[in-house]
Every structure is written in C-alpha cells, then in structure tokens.
Amino acid sequence: MKMVFRWFGSQDDPVPLEYIRQIPAMTGIAGTLPDIPVGEVWPVERIAALREEVNGAGLEFEVVESVGMHEDIKLGKPSRDEWIAKYQETIRRLGKYGVKVICYNFMPVFDWTRTELAKVLPDGSNTMAYDEAALAKIDPSRIVESMSEMSKGYYLPGWEPERLGRLDELFRAYRDVGEDDLAVNLGYFLKKIVPVCKESGIKMAIHPDDPPWSVFGLPRIMKSAADIERILGFVDEPENGLTLCTGCFGSNPANDIPAVIRRFGERIHFAHVRNIKISGQCTFHETSHYSCDGSLDVYAIMRTYHDIGYRGYVRPDHGRMIWGENGRPGYGLYDRALGVAYLNGIWEALERS
C-alpha cells in the first residue's frame, strides 16, 4: 500500500509538508486546490506549482481529493455537458502532471454532514459527530451557518459558501429528483469521462455517501454494496472505481466492510481508513483508529486489504483533536499521525506473519 495524507495547500492548511514528510512510511499527499470555484477548469500553472511544492518536500502528488462536481451534472440539467467538458479538461491536465487517482463524490448539495465538529470525549479530546435526532431539529436553511460557526474559520471541503449561498434554490431543484434519477445522471457522467481517464492514465474513485442515508430528504446512491455494484456496472472499466471510506460506509452496521473489500477489491483505488463509535440509530462520533475505541474492526479491515494483495493508496481519515491542537475539524496532525502509525503496525505484522 502507499500511505498518503490529505493536505489542503500551504495557504489553507496549518499542517506543513515538512511535518507530513516526517510521518513514517508516508509517500505523498492527497491534494486539492480548494479556492477553484466548483466546476471550473484547474489552471495548469496552479497544478504545476502544487506538484512542485509537494515534490520539493520529498512527497508524491499522485492523488487528488477532490475535483469539485458542479450541481448541474448531478441534476442532469441541459448545461451539464458544458460542465462535464470542463471536468474532462481538468482530468487531462492532472494526468499530464502525474496524478493517478481522483477521489470524488456524487452527493447532492452537502458533501458530508455532521451535527457537531468538536464533541468533547471523556478523555478530553474532541471530534466530529452526527446525531440524527439533533439534525431533525435543525432547519436546513440554518445548517450552512451552523457549520460555518463550528469550522474555526477554516474552509470545509464540500461546504463552499458561494455554492451553498443559494441553498433554497438547490433544494427546489432536487425536489423531484429520486435515487434512480441521480444514478442515471452519474452513469451519464461516467460514460463521458472514462474515455478521457483512459487517455490520461487516471482512475476515478467515487466516495461513499457521508452518512450513507438520506439527509434532509435528499437522494443518496452510494450507501451499500448493491449501490456499488450498480455504479461499477455503469462503465465496467478499471477507471470507474471506488474510494472506500470505512468511517462513513461503516456508520451503517449493515455494511460489512471486509466483505465489500473482498468483493470489489480490484476496483478500490483509494482507501480511507478510520474508526467510529456508533451510539444509536443513525448516530455516531469519530474516534481514534484503534479498533477497541470504536465500532469498527480496523484490524480485520487491514487484514482483508492485505489478503487481497492491495497495493493502492491509503490514508488515515479524520482524526480527533488531541494534545491541545487547534486546526481544521477532522484534519489535525497528531491523531492522524497516530492513525498512520497504527495502520503501519498492523500492516507490518501482516507482512511478516
């Protein structure tokens, strides 16, 4: 496996590349250009500068997380071909600069949802949490303001204020869009971009819905093994692949993560590994990576990746805030670095057994 670390760029990430480079077995970063408006083509000079900066720190830039998906593509509007053409051009440009995998999602309106970004745990650390009962009390028009207030001033991926500033309009647009409609629109998108991916040497890796159930009545189409099978069937090519996120996929106890890895392993191009503690129906909070701290068997997950001979990209996913660290919710240095050490330890033991 190749261990990478999500990084938001020197202008927007308090964790410097030199610190990431010091984490044992770290090979590269999963990078992005967070200030590019959703759907617009990434400028060549910005891609080149990002690669140069990352390579200059002794790390690889082979994974992008994420290239923003314009809402018109998800909605299947007549303008989608214009936005897909821009996405295709970004793929071509990233391929020329050595990117191998693009992680993306097809979630309507909200890329991910939490009701708390700094839930205090008994040990004094804090973490992100989701509570369905708490969400039911939040007016959808208030959620963007609430997330902004909890963000500590940091950009939150998937919560772009310029896009979500027209939230009422977006909700109206999705009023008559069901899961099957959204799936058809994803299939249309994939059929357009996979040929470009083949030419560019890039694999697309769709991220599960986070959480894997409807939020505010919006459709979800990447929440189960059956959904994965449908999505991979739209274009049955290696370039149409998966980002398997254990934390969001595993928040539904019905999802058997090791079974999914065994079944779809050849199409998993990016693995997000983290742990969560499920405390009720559609209610969970994020924990350390250590299996005993949460509801997921991280050892069994890593063992299954080892059993199938996985050699793709892996990153520690969201971490708690520990040791007094202050940073972007879920993306501090210390707990994610501990997560890397834990995953590396499991992997070494499996390699030597």
Image: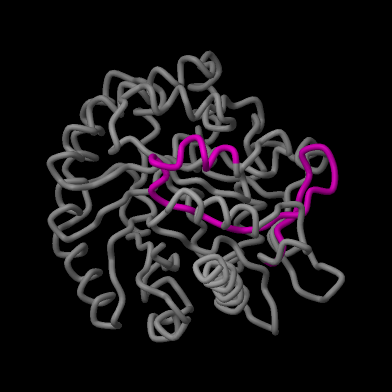
Residue 343 figure quarter: bottom right
Q: Is residue 21 above or below residue 238?
A: below
Left or right? Give the position of 239 relative to 278. Answer: left
Does residue 322 show up magenta in the picture? no
Residue 121 figure quarter: bottom right
**Location of residue 126 in the rendering, given as x and y in whole percent from the top left corner:** 74, 69
Which residue appears at 48% of the width and 78% of the height?
14
One can see residue 179 in this view = yes
One can see residue 161 in this view = no
What stretch of residues is rendered in magenta? 259-288
Q: Nearer the viewer, residue 271 or 336?
A: 271
Which residue appears at 41% of the width and 23% of the height?
75
Residue 87 figure quarter: top left
Screen quadrant of the N terminus: bottom left
Q: Is residue 204 above or below residue 345?
A: above
Left or right? Give the position of 9 relative to 128. Answer: left
**Location of residue 314 in the rendering, given as x and y in whole percent from the top left corner:** 45, 60
Q: Nearer the viewer, residue 167 or 75?
A: 75
**Location of residue 317 in the rendering, given as x and y in whole percent from the top left corner:** 55, 60
Which residue appears at 47% of the width and 81% of the height?
23
Q: Is residue 129 above or below residue 261?
A: below
Q: Nearer the viewer, residue 242 or 37?
A: 242
